[in-house]
Amino acid sequence: DSGVTQTPKHLITATGQRVTLRCSPRSGDLSVYWYQQSLDQGLQFLIQYYNGEERAKGNILERFSAQQFPDLHSELNLSSLELGDSALYFCASSEPLTGGWYGYTFGSGTRLTVV
Amino acid sequence: SQELEQSPQSLIVQEGKNLTINCTSSKTLYGLYWYKQKYGEGLIFLMMLQKGGEEKSHEKITAKLDEKKQQSSLHITASQPSHAGIYLCGADTNDYKLSFGAGTTVTVRA
């Protein structure tokens, strides 16, 4: 157990639907990152939140949105789902280390299948 | 944005043999992370290299960072079936996120 909790582990849904993925960071970590991993695109950064505020945005589609709540858990909302959205979605949290570095810990992921 | 290229894309090694994976950056590497992933599972942190010339080892895995070449290598000695998986290198970008290479799939044959 990495300390980063993602639910659900698996999700099967139909095209056009909307789903919510949930992530609880490691205790004490203020940052949450979302990544998408598909066979043809590899591990792609979507978005980062730090203490409730959006800090960085990657290749996140407009149909996707995220937020981080006061208790620091985060949700990734995917809407108008398409077959191509089928992927593994990972959440990570980070802790500051000495020298300005960060330690990143990943959750076990949510496997989304759009049918 | 920083691009990381991993080579080889995949490799098959006989159990007991050594293997090396390379990660080359399009920009100056100030630090690099190595992760391992079993297919369809989460990423497991292996090592972080912070300085040029740094070398770290854990059990049979050694990673080095060559700042001048903008490259890091991961070397596994006497491979075992437990070493099979996808190895990913990641680098911190200036905006506080990790960018990853495409990964190297390692298969260990008995």
Image: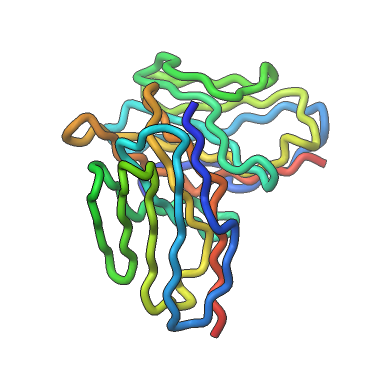
* Percent x, y of residue B61: 34, 66
Residue occupying image coordinates x 39% and y 22%: B95
Q: Is residue B85 toward the left or the right of residue B65 in the image?
A: right
Kindly indicate the quadrant of the structure image that contains residue A50: top left
> For this rendering, which residue is in front, B52 or A92?
B52
Give the quadrant of residue B57. bottom left
Question: Residue A73: x and y, percent?
Answer: 43, 28
The answer to whether residue A48 is visible is yes
Q: Residue furthest front?
A: B68
Picture residue at 41% right of the left edge, 14% below the top: A53
Classify the position of the C terminus of chain B by image quarter.
bottom right
Colour logic: rainbow
Above or below, A2 against B20 in this view is above
> x, y (%) of residue B105?
57, 61
Residue A1 shows in the view: no
The one of A64 and B99 positioned closer to us in this rendering: B99
